[in-house]
Amino acid sequence: GEMIGAMLNNMSEEKRAGLLAFIEQSSPDILADVKSAILTFADIPTRVPVKAVPQITREIDVPTLLKAVKYGRQNAPETVEFLFANISQRLVQQYEEQMKDMKPVPMAEAEAAQAEIMVAVRKLVAEGVFELTKLEVEGEADETVYV
């Protein structure tokens, strides 16, 4: 599951979704392992601790961060909100001003910027700077039945 997850981390969103659907159909037994190994830009709010956000944003150059955030407003608005809520509001205002003046970003460039952020996240995790929150897989966390 982890090796497949690592490969999926490097795919475009569209291809990843297609492959996950295929795994769900063909090998549902490994789906949970694969999903827990995947870490995408949209997963940041549920997997990354709040205290790690400033460290992550310092790892990324500003133009890359702005491209990722600009695209993130469309494909992962919760992530943008999470990132901006956990850095200095003065910085957020600067970023907002800079994004107003940005030209439209090609999709491939925006996805690459988001992928670069994920590389930084994985690097910081590998260095022991912070740990990712475990992904709660449906059916595993709470077995209580409510009626």
Image (cartoon, rainbow, N blue to C red):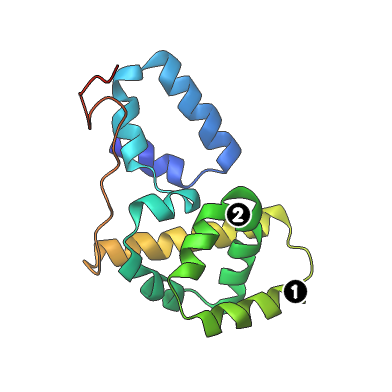
When the figure is inspected, residue 34 is found, relative to residue 42, above or below; the finding is above
When the figure is inspected, residue 125 is found, relative to residue 8, above or below; the finding is below
Identify the residue position indicated by label 2 in the image.
111
Point 34% across, 59% down: residue: 122
* Relative image position of residue 104 (x, y in whole percent): 78, 63
* Relative image position of residue 65 (x, y in whole percent): 56, 70
Point 49% across, 23% down: residue: 21
Q: Is residue 65 left or right of residue 55?
A: right
The number of numbered badges drawn on the structure is 2
Point 31% across, 67% down: residue: 124
Q: Is residue 89 left or right of residue 30?
A: right
Q: Amino acid at mark 2?
A: Glu
Q: Secondary structure at mark 2?
A: helix
Q: Quadrant of residue 29?
A: top left
Quadrant (top left, top right, bottom left, bottom right) of the N terminus: top left
Q: Give whichever of discs 1 and 2 has the lower sequence position.
A: 1
In this rendering, the label closer to the viewer, 1 or 2: 1
Q: Quadrant of residue 51?
A: bottom left
* Relative image position of residue 105 (x, y in whole percent): 73, 62
The numbered mark at residue 100 is 1
Q: Secondary structure at mark 1?
A: helix
Q: Amino acid at mark 1?
A: Lys
Count residues near mark 2 (Cα–Cα under 10 Å), then give few for <14, some for 14-19, many for 20+. Answer: many
